Image: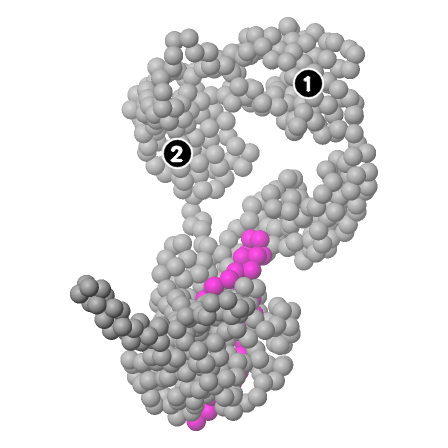
């Protein structure tokens, strides 16, 4: 009985504590519709858009309990503070303590992005802006624009956009973003758009930065940058807003891009700037990578197309005829198959022309051990002998019209004999399939036979027709395929006027995977036949530097990335239709 009395007394004593705990920790009520309303500002002290500001603390009160989410990434202060302010929450009030001296006659803005969210559902108060001035007026001019990726023109979200004054006495102009923090800063939205507001009337330099370390400086090799070549000046917005000095704390500026679609935001400005973001690439030729495989093969990759790629074995003399080499079409990759299986490792001095870029050791025994570890088991004595692998260029056993059947080997062949091969064309059977080698190292063979659309074909390879350089041969193989019917495909004709530049023209699928590429220097009619029905994209790269590749920018040299253009409409290919378009490029 005493124990029961103790439990009852303890329960009633705990009730006030539970009641106080629930009062101190507001939560959403159970049931009912989900709260989707963001918190609203009720007041602030000092009031938003105050002048002659001389306080060390800002208090912003809301209509509900809030929290600050990712303030270091979301909250932007222009001009930036040398030290970040302290943020605290007291009830429904956000308190900001400023820990430094403010510049005289300066307008400051605190842009909260999506940082202010309600406590229950984390609904964000989007793009709330608090402004104040240490002088007698709040600056009200603005600059708007967008940041896109230079190579594919996709919009870039969460990118810092920064303004610098025209001159900084202690810093050379070409080093400004590396050594100086910006005077004003904003961040791009989901549409890649930015608006720098409450600006004073003077000329600025405009940059965009993917700031990896969050210090507002272009000082990391993996940071991306974009810049304008000339100075710009802020403007008055076309869509007028009430004088910012008269705005109350519950008013969100009508220029918030999230309230409008991207076209409306663009139309607010007479000048809407486009910044093309890129990552600088060292233009100096260098060795990027050396890969080792087993059976013994290694691959050397240069940063750019090599003029005279070569290597020298420096730790031994392997003699003659110990390798087979193949240079890629782009001339940046050299593949070497080692035919002398006794060679265990090679030390290579790798060069392009007379310049040696590196000395590396390639070990084939190590590569073999790695592969053995990956299998996780030893071969059994009665396990099937490994055979030569052969692929074809058919898709789903269909060969597109106009193409020749190809046999593709993983490694070069040492010898082959098609005399015992059977080729079946409809009702005809041909002994000795007419294949011919079409590359320099005998890895690709093409059927030299004019095939008819919508027809059936097949071939039979007996055992041991192909002999690879590593001693493997093929198992008996029988396969069939059909040629596509031309009426199930479409044709595309593109008449291109290249203007004053040479252009690389790419045909791509919807995922921007390149399918075909052309290089044009003058007006040309490109006819692409037998395309599968579907949606295609056309991309043009302005080849300013005449090297048949896209070049990124270099800020220190004031070099912008090469211009990229997309044909303004998707290309819809339908079966048994011809589509013809014309494109005039700058």
- Quadrant occupied by the N terminus: bottom left
From the image, tell me which residue sits under label 1.
480
Q: Residues within 10 Å of mark 2 (few under 14, many from 20)?
A: some
From the top left corner, tell me how far across and down residue 406 is, in percent: 64, 23
Residue drawn at point x = 36 percent, y = 24 percent: 376
The chief SS type of the magenta part is loop
Task: Identify the element where label 1 is drawn.
Answer: strand
Cβ–Cβ below 8 Å for labels 2 and 1? no
Which of pointers 2 and 1 lies earlier in the amino acid sequence? 2
Task: Identify the element where label 2 is drawn.
Answer: strand
Residue drawn at point x = 40 percent, y = 54 percent: 222
Q: Reply yes or no: does residue 39 show up in magenta.
A: no
From the top left corner, tell me how far across and down residue 294 is, in percent: 40, 23
Considering depth in this image, is 35 or 78 the residue closer to the camera? 35
In the rendered structure, the answer to whether residue 43 lies left or right of residue 580 reads: left
Q: How many marks?
A: 2
Q: How is the image coloured?
A: one colour
| Furthest-front residue in this view | 1
Considering depth in this image, is 454 or 531 the residue closer to the camera? 454
In the rendered structure, the answer to whether residue 498 lies left or right of residue 485 reads: left
Q: Reply yes or no: does residue 146 show up in magenta.
A: yes
From the top left corner, tell me how far across and down residue 284 is, in percent: 42, 47
Residue 519: mark in rendering:
none
Residue drawn at point x = 29 percent, y = 24 percent: 315
From the image, tell me which residue sits under label 2.
290
Per the model, the C-alpha gap separating discs 2 and 1 is 39 Å
Region in magenta: 136-160
């Amino acid at each position: 009985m005493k124990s029961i009395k103790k439990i009852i007394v303890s329960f009633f004593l705990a009730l006030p504590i539970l009641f106080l705990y629930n009062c101190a920790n507001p939560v959403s009520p159970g049931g009912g519709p989900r709260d989707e309303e963001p918190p609203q500002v009720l007041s602030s002290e000092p009031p938003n858009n105050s002048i002659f500001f001389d306080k060390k603390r800002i208090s912003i009160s809301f209509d509900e309990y809030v929290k600050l989410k990712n303030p270091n990434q979301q909250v932007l202060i222009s001009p930036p503070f040398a030290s970040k302010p302290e943020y605290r929450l007291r009830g429904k009030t956000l308190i900001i303590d400023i820990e430094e001296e403010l510049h005289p006659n300066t307008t400051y803005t605190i842009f909260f992005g999506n940082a202010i969210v309600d406590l229950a559902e984390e609904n964000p108060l989007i793009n709330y802006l608090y402004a104040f001035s240490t002088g007698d007026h709040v600056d009200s001019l603005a600059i708007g624009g967008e940041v896109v990726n230079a190579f594919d023109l996709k919009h870039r979200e969460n990118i810092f956009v920064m303004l610098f004054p025209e001159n900084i006495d202690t810093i050379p102009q070409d080093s400004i973003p590396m050594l100086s923090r910006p005077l004003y800063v904003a961040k791009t939205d989901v549409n890649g758009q930015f608006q720098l507001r409450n600006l004073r009337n003077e000329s600025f330099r405009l940059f965009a930065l993917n700031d990896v370390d969050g210090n507002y400086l272009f000082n990391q090799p993996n940071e991306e940058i974009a810049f304008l070549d000339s100075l710009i000046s802020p403007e008055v917005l076309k869509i007028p807003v009430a004088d910012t000095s008269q705005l109350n704390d519950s008013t969100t500026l009508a220029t918030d891009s999230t309230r409008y679609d991207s076209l409306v935001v663009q139309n607010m400005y007479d000048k809407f700037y486009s910044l093309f973001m890129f990552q600088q690439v060292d233009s100096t030729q260098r060795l990027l990578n050396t890969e080792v495989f087993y059976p013994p093969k290694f691959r050397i990759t240069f940063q750019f197309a090599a003029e005279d790629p070569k290597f020298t074995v420096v730790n031994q003399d392997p003699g003659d005829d110990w390798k087979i080499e193949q240079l890629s079409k782009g001339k940046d990759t050299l593949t070497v198959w080692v035919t002398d299986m006794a060679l265990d490792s090679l030390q290579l001095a790798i060069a392009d022309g007379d310049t040696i870029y590196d000395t590396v050791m390639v070990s084939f025994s190590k590569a073999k051990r790695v592969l053995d570890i990956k299998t996780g088991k030893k071969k059994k004595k009665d396990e099937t002998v490994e055979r030569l692998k052969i692929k074809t260029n058919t898709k789903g056993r269909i060969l597109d019209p106009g193409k020749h059947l190809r046999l593709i080997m993983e490694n070069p062949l040492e010898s082959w004999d098609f005399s015992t091969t059977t080729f079946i064309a409809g009702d005809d059977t041909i002994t000795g399939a007419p294949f011919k080698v079409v590359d320099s190292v005998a890895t690709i063979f093409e059927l030299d036979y004019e095939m008819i659309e919508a027809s059936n074909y097949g071939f039979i390879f007996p055992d041991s027709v192909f002999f690879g350089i590593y001693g493997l041969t093929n198992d008996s193989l029988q396969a069939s395929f059909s040629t596509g019917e031309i009426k199930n495909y479409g044709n595309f004709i593109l008449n291109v006027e290249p203007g004053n530049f040479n252009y690389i023209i790419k045909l791509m699928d919807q995922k921007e995977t390149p399918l075909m590429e052309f290089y044009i220097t003058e007006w040309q009619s490109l006819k692409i036949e037998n395309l599968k029905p579907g949606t295609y994209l056309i991309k043009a790269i302005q080849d300013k530097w005449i090297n048949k590749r896209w070049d990124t920018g270099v800020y220190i040299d004031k070099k912008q990335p090469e211009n990229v253009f997309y044909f303004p409409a998707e290309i819809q290919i339908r079966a048994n239709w011809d589509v013809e378009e014309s494109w005039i490029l700058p």
